[in-house]
Amino acid sequence: MRWKRSRAILEFALVCLLILFAPCALRAERCGLPLKGVEFGDSFLQVDTVRGEVDSVVEEVSVEDFASRRESDLQGQGDTLRLRGSGKHGRWRHFCDSLGQGGGAVMALTLPGGGQVLNRDYWKLPVFYGGIAMFSYGAYFYGREYNRLGIEPLPGAPLEALRYEDARLRARMGRDGMIAGACITYAASVADALISHSPNRQSATAAMVSSALLPGLGQIYNRSFWKLPLIYGGLSYLISEAVSDHQLYVRYERAYVALADDDPLTVDEFNGQVPLSTLEYGASYYRRYRDLSIIGIALVYALNIIDAYVDAHLFYWNVNEDITVRAEPQVAVNHLGVRRGVTPSMHVSVLF
């Protein structure tokens, strides 16, 4: 009777041990810990001393992590020493590679071609410098021709006067086109420097600076080509409205001044048929809408920069409909306080 009672107590103790240490044993088995066995008669119970084993594993991991970190630090110091010992050329390469996007942008903006020197793309320097020099000379040539035609007196014959105005208009358009070409070449050199400085990842700084220099260039860098018609359509409409309203404002303003000066020698273009109050209202009306169009141009330009910057940040954002829920048991080791223990727990992660 006493033997049966002792055996029942022993079996109850075994069940309690299984309930308490089975999760820890499973977790230890997943981690690859060796399990210590305890024999009870004919049966063999694998009960792991989880506390001591987990502590030893934590210490081993800490030592391995420290060793790996120390090895990487020594390797980095060795690379630095090799760079320092390789002369001026090695130090210059180290400086170029360690310079971030902000420093590269400053160098490319302040010195045309500086970004290509920073990226060691020396073969691009003749292309950009040649383009800027060609467009600059063209702007100088057409500007000098435009100024010469403006100084010469207007011919008296109607046909000659028409040819004169046409030549002056073509000279002005050529000058403006050459200036625009030089600006576009400069913007392309800066954008090329920033993009080449980070070829393996999407850079928000490169997208922002590119769109600031040339609207839509950052969208091309982000491969959002469908936004280009929106940007250039809005800018074209607002610029045309601003130019038209400015021309009408100048006409009404001149007519108002000519009619209000009480000088009989000055005649407005409407020959006095439009009242003074109407001219004043027209000048105020077109000036107001011209200013609103300029504000709209500034807003579209700012939104173009913000869109390029945000789109580059979200370039690698995953927007698919896959949602993954992962649940796995784990052991939380308590190293704080007087009593150190192991607590079974459940880790749940949601990936979307």
Image (cartoon, helix red, strand yellow):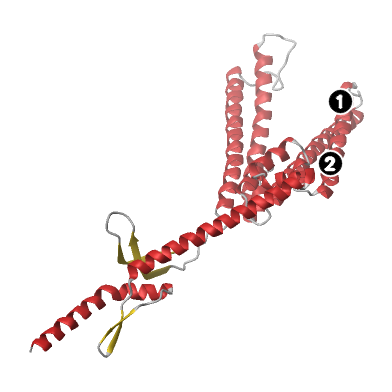
For the residue carrying disc 1, how many other residues have a C-alpha within 10 Å: few (<14), some (14-19), or many (20+)?
few
- Is 276 located above or below residue 236 in the figure? above
- Is 74 located above or below residue 304 in the figure? below
In the image, 60 versus 79, the foreground residue is 60
Name the residue furthest left. 1
Residue 75: x and y in percent read 64, 55
- Is 232 located above or below residue 52 in the figure? above
Q: Amino acid at mark 2?
A: Tyr
Q: Residue at x 50, y 65 (%)?
A: 320
Q: Residue under circle 1?
A: 147
Residue 69: x and y in percent read 55, 56
In the image, 206 versus 53, the foreground residue is 53
**SS state under label 1:** helix
In the image, 133 versus 246, the foreground residue is 133
Using the rendered view, name the quadrant where residue 297 is placed.
Answer: top right
Question: Can residue 83 be spotted in the picture?
Answer: yes
In the image, 133 versus 298, the foreground residue is 133
Residue 55: x and y in percent read 38, 64
Q: Quadrant of the N terminus?
A: bottom left
2 or 1: mark nearer the eye? 2
Question: Can residue 193 be spotted in the picture?
Answer: no
Left/right placement of residue 37 relative to residue 13 reads right
Left/right placement of residue 185 relative to residue 297 reads right
Q: Earlier in the sequence, mark 2 or mark 1?
A: 2
Q: Residue at x 75, y 44 (%)?
A: 92
Residue 129 bears which disc, if any?
A: 2
**SS state under label 2:** helix
Q: Residue at x 63, y 39 (%)?
A: 238
Q: CA distance from mark 2 to mark 1?
A: 27 Å
Q: Amino acid at mark 1?
A: Asn
Q: Quadrant of the C terminus?
A: bottom left
Residue 116: x and y in percent read 77, 46
